[in-house]
Image: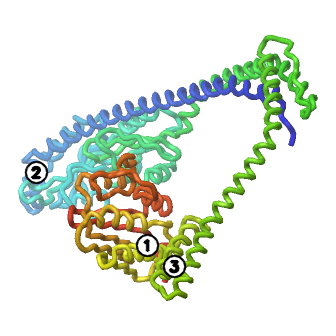
Amino acid sequence: MKRTSIRYRLMILMICLTTLPVITMTWIATDNTRESVEKEILEANHSRMMWANQYLDELFRQMDVLFYSLQVDQELIDGLNRNENEDIGLQFRTQKYIQETLTKAFYANSKKIDELALYTYQNQKAYAINYANSGLTYSLDIEKGNWSRMLREPINMYFKESGNDIYAFHSINDFQDRRLLGGLSIRINKQVWKEVSTILKSEEESLVFLINDEGERLSGSTPDQSFEKVISQLGNDYSPKEEPEIRRTESYYIFIKRVDDGELTLIKALPISTISKSANITVKAGLITGSLFAVVSILLSIAVSLRITRPIVGLARTMRTTPLHQFEQTSIRSYDEISLLERGYNSMMQRMKELVENGYQKEIEVKNAQLMALQAQINPHFLNNTLNLIGGMALVKGAPEIYKITKVIGDLLRYSISSGDDIATLEDELKHVRNYLFIQEQRFQGRCTIIVESDGRANSTTVPRFTLQPLVENAFEHGLQSKEGSWEIEIRVKKVRRHLVIFLMDNGVGIPSERLRILRSALTEGSSLKPELGNTNLENEKPKVRKGIGLQNVVSRLKLHYGGDASMRIFSKPDLGTVFVIKLPLQNGREQE
C-alpha cells in the first residue's frame, strides 16, 4: 500500500480549510440571490393579480348595475310577459319601449360592451342592440347553447365563449315563484381582456388563462397549448380562495385568483426557468469571483504547507533510517517546534525499550491467569460430580430422600454452570424453578403449597436464564417468611394470542403502596432503584442490600432480549400477597407446536 507523505496530506488539508469557506460563502450568496430574485418576482406578480382582480371587479359591478337596472324596470318586465296575440298597437309600443331602453343601456356602457341582448322566454324572441344595429329582433330557442343554463336554475351571472367573443349572461326570473321570464346577455369588448392580459403578462414566457365557473378556458387567455399541462400539474384542483393563491409545481409557479363570487378565475403560470434566468447574471458574477478566490487560496495553501512540512520531512527521513532494534535516540539541534517532535521521538524510544523489557513478565502473568480461570472452571464440575456420588451412596444405603435432594441440587448446579449463552428454553427454565421449589418444600415441609402449571404449547420458546428464579426467591425471602400460617405460591404459564404470559403469585405479606409505586416507576421509566433499596427487596418495608440477579436486572435482560415487546408488571396489596405478570412475545409471532 502506497504511503501518503505528510507534506501532501497537510497540503490537502490546508487547501480544504481555505477553499471550503470560499465555496460555502459563494454558494450561500448565490442561493440568497436566487431567493431574493424569486421573492421579488413572486411579490410583483401577486400585486399584478390584485390589480387585474380590481379591474375585473369594476367591470362586474358595472355589469351588475346594468342587469339589475333593466330587471327592476317594471314596464320592461311586463313587456316580456305579454302575449303576441294582444293588441297590435300595444305590442308596437312595448317593442318600441324595449328597443329604447336597451339602446340607452347599451350606449351608457359602450366602453366595455359591444352588444346587449334581451331574451323573452314566453315569446322565444331576442332583442339585440350593437354598433351595427340599433334594434334587431329574432327568434331564439335556448334549449341548447349558451343560454340553456338559465333553464336549470336562476343565475345572477355566468360567462360563456362564442366564436372568439366572451358573453356574460343573466337570467330574469319572477320574484315570487322564480319561474324564468327571460334573460340578458352582453358581449364584452375585447379591449377589456387585452387590458387584463397586459396587466398580468409581465414576463414574455408567462401564460395567462381566463376560466369560467364551469372550468372552461375563455378566449381572453394566452393562445397557447399549455393550458392542459398547467391544469394537470394543478391536479385539476384550481378552486381558489378569496386571496390570490401561489402554487409551485414541477415546471411553474402558478398564481390563482377568484374574481368576485367565482364567476371567473384568473390563472397565471410563470415558468420556474424564467426566475432562474433572471438571477443568472448575478449568479455568474458570484461564481467567477468565488472561483478566483478559490484559486488564490489553493496557491497560498501550497506555499504555506511546503514551508511548514520541509523540517518535518527531514525529521521523518532521519527516523526512517534509524534501526528500530537499537533504540537509538536523536540529538536535538534546535529549539523550535521541530525540537518538540524530536523530544517526543526520544521519549518514544525509551518507552519502547521499557515495554520490551516488561513484555515477558506480562506474558507470564497472562498464562497464570488463564491457568487460574481453568482451575475455577473445574471446581464447580467437581462439586457436581461429588453431589452425584453422595446421591448414589444414599440410594445404595436405602435413603431415597437424600438421593432425590442431592440429585435436585446437582441439577440446579448444572443449570448454573452449563456452557453456552445466556438463553434457555422455557421448558428448561421451568424445570430449574421446579428444582428450586422442591428444595424449599423440603425446608418448609407441610407448610408450603406450590403449584406450577403450563399448557406446554410454548415450551420451545427461548427466555433469558434465571428469569423466574429471582422472582420465586424474592417471594420466599420477602413475602412468605414474614407470614405466619400456611404459604402458597403459584406459577402459571399461558398462551394469550401471540404472547406468552407468566403469572407468579404468592399469599405473602405484600408490598406497601409507597414502595410499590417506587418499583413501578423504576420499571416503567427505566430509572434505577436507590442502592439502599436493593434489587430484589420488594416486600420488606426495611430493605437491605443483597447480591444476585435483581428485579431490575431481570427486566433489563428481558428488554435486551425482546426489546419493547416484553414487559413485567407488579400487583400487590398488604397482607394479601403479590402477583408478577411477565408478558413475552412468541417466536416468529406464534408458538412452535
Question: Nearer the N terminus, badge 3 or badge 1?
Answer: 3
Local secondary structure at mark 3: helix
Looking at the image, is 520 positioned above or below residue 27? below
Amino acid type of the residue that numbered disc 3 sits on in the rendered structure: Lys
- Asked whether disc 3 touches disc 1, contact meaning CB atoms under 8 Å apart, the reply is no
* Residue highlighted by disc 3: 407
Which residue is under mark 2?
77
Q: How crowded is mark 1: few (under 14 residues within 10 Å), some or many (20 or more)?
A: some
Image vertical order of residue 366 relative to residue 500, above or below: above
Please tell me in which quadrant of the rendered image residue 580 appears: bottom left
Specify the label residue 436 is tagged with: 1
Gap between marks 3 and 1 measured at Cα? 12 Å
Q: Decide: is 50 above or below 410.
A: above
Residue sitting at 39 percent across and 54 percent down? 535
Residue drawn at x 50%, y 66% is 464
Question: Horizontal placement of 23 versus 185: left or right?
Answer: right
Instruction: Check the picture and name the quadrant holding the N terminus.
Output: top right
For residue 184, say whether it is visible. Answer: no
* Element marked by disc 2: helix
Q: What element carries label 1?
A: helix
